Image: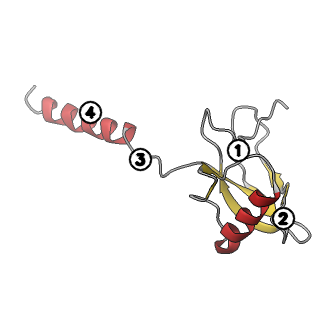
């Protein structure tokens, strides 16, 4: 019984640490940005499931620059499409990622993919 208590305590501590992990594992997706900063849809291969939201491979065809962008968390809407947003995306995408980028105090993100649309 005494040997069981430390093992249970370790398992509980590991579970608590996993539950309190920081949100640095923000889900991301790929968008294709034109030279002017306009977003065009990529071509993505996804699982044939309504429940699995993973994207396996996303490609940009034409002049679109492949850019990593975070998926908006629940309750957060993506910023409205404007010329100023395009400029902010163009500047932010020079590093190939818009993770952590903001526009007018709002995170630059995209709405989650909905297979039911």
Which residue is found at the position 72% from the left and 63% from the top?
89
- Which mark is first along the chain, 4 or 3? 4
Q: List the residue tagged with mark 3.
A: 22
Secondary structure of residue under mark 2: loop
Q: List the residue tagged with mark 4.
A: 12
Mark 2–mark 4 CB contact (< 8 Å) = no
- Which mark is first along the chain, 1 or 3? 3
Q: Nearer the viewer, residue 89 or 97?
A: 89
Which residue is found at the position 25% from the left and 37% from the top?
13
Q: Position of residue 26 (x, y in %)?
A: 55, 49
Quarter of the image for the C terminus: give it: top right
Horizontally, is 97 left or right of 114 in the view? left
Q: List the residue tagged with mark 2.
A: 60
- Which mark is first along the chain, 1 or 2? 2
Q: What is the CA distance from the residue labelled 2 to the residue labelled 1?
A: 21 Å
Q: List the residue tagged with mark 1.
A: 78
Q: Residues within 10 Å of mark 4 (few under 14, many from 20)?
A: few
Q: How is the protein colored in the picture? A: secondary structure
Q: Quadrant of residue 73?
A: top right
Quarter of the image for the N terminus: give it: top left
Question: So how many labels did they put on this image?
Answer: 4
**Looking at the picture, does residue 6 appear above or below residue 71?**
above
Which residue is found at the position 82% from the left and 29% from the top?
116
Q: Nearer the viewer, residue 90 or 52?
A: 90
**Looking at the picture, does residue 5 appear above or below residue 18?**
above
Q: What is the CA distance from the residue labelled 3 to the residue labelled 2?
A: 31 Å
Q: What is the CA distance from the residue labelled 3 to the residue labelled 4?
A: 18 Å
Residue 31 in view = no
């Amino acid at each position: 019984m005494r040997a069981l208590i430390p093992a249970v305590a370790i398992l509980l501590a590991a579970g608590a640490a996993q539950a309190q992990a920081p949100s640095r594992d923000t889900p991301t997706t790929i968008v294709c940005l034109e030279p002017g900063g306009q977003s065009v849809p990529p071509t993505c291969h996804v699982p044939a499931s309504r429940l699995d939201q993973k994207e396996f491979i996303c490609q940009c065809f034409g002049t679109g620059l492949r850019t990593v962008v975070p998926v908006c968390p629940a309750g957060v809407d993506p910023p409205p499409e404007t010329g100023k947003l395009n400029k902010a995306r163009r500047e932010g995408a020079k590093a190939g990622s818009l993770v952590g980028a903001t526009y007018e105090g709002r995170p630059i993100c995209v709405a989650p993919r909905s297979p039911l649309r």
